[in-house]
Amino acid sequence: MSFSYEPGAAPDISDITRVRFHTGQTVEDESLLSDEEISFALAETMAWRLAVILCLQLVIQKMSRPNFTADWLKMDYAGAKAGYVLMLSEKRAEFGLQTILTATSVAVYRSDSLQTEAPEGW
């Protein structure tokens, strides 16, 4: 798992650094994202803003692990997960990527029959 975060002047900033900055994954020992995962998100989305959204969704998935307790140690991901869910909604708004709901109609008769109207008796 490799890690790189090199903030600098605007034209010289890599897309991996941009994604790390916007997801808060800037400290190597605390990062939940590897450079490989970020590179994959960049390749899938072809845009760093969309990669930020995809990476935040990945972090939320990682935070969805079940809580556990062993002797004095308790792992509870709920608080951290809630913070990342809030960050995801804020980044969607910041980048203008709010969720848009769409609906499609479904024919009540077989679509492969080339019928344009419902058959008689329906």
Image (cartoon, grey):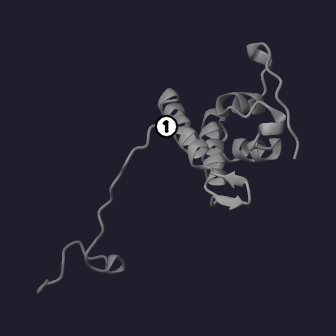
The answer to whether 2 is drawn above or below residue 62 in the figure is: above
Q: Determine whether, in the image, residue 92 is placed left or right of residue 7.
A: left
105 left or right of 30? left
Q: Residue 102, position in %: x, y? A: 36, 51
* Closer to the camera in the image, 61 or 10: 61
The x and y percentages for residue 67 are 63, 58
Observer-nearest of 13 and 22: 22
Say how many tags the image has.
1
Helix, strand or loop under label 1? helix
Relative height, residue 6 to residue 63 (above, below): above
Question: Can you name the residue that lies furthest to the top here?
Answer: 9
Q: Residue at 64%, 37% (x, y): give it.
A: 52
Looking at this rendering, what residue extends furthest in the bottom direction?
Answer: 121
Above or below, comparing residue 122 to residue 42 in the picture: below
**Neighbour class for label 1 at 10 Å: few (<14), some, many (≥20)?**
some
Considering every residue shown, the one lying at the far right of the view is 2
Comparing 59 with 45, the one in front is 59
Task: Tell me which residue sits at (60%, 47%) in the image.
Answer: 57
Quick one: which residue is furthest to the left in this view?
121
Task: Identify the amino acid type marked 1.
Answer: Ser
Task: Look at 80% across and 18% down and name the residue there.
Answer: 12
Where residue 122 sits in the image (x, y, percent)? 14, 83
Residue sitting at x 86%, y 37%: 3
Which residue bears the numbered disc 1? 89
Instruction: Please state the horizontal and vertical placement of residue 22, each as a whole percent of the image.
Output: 65, 29
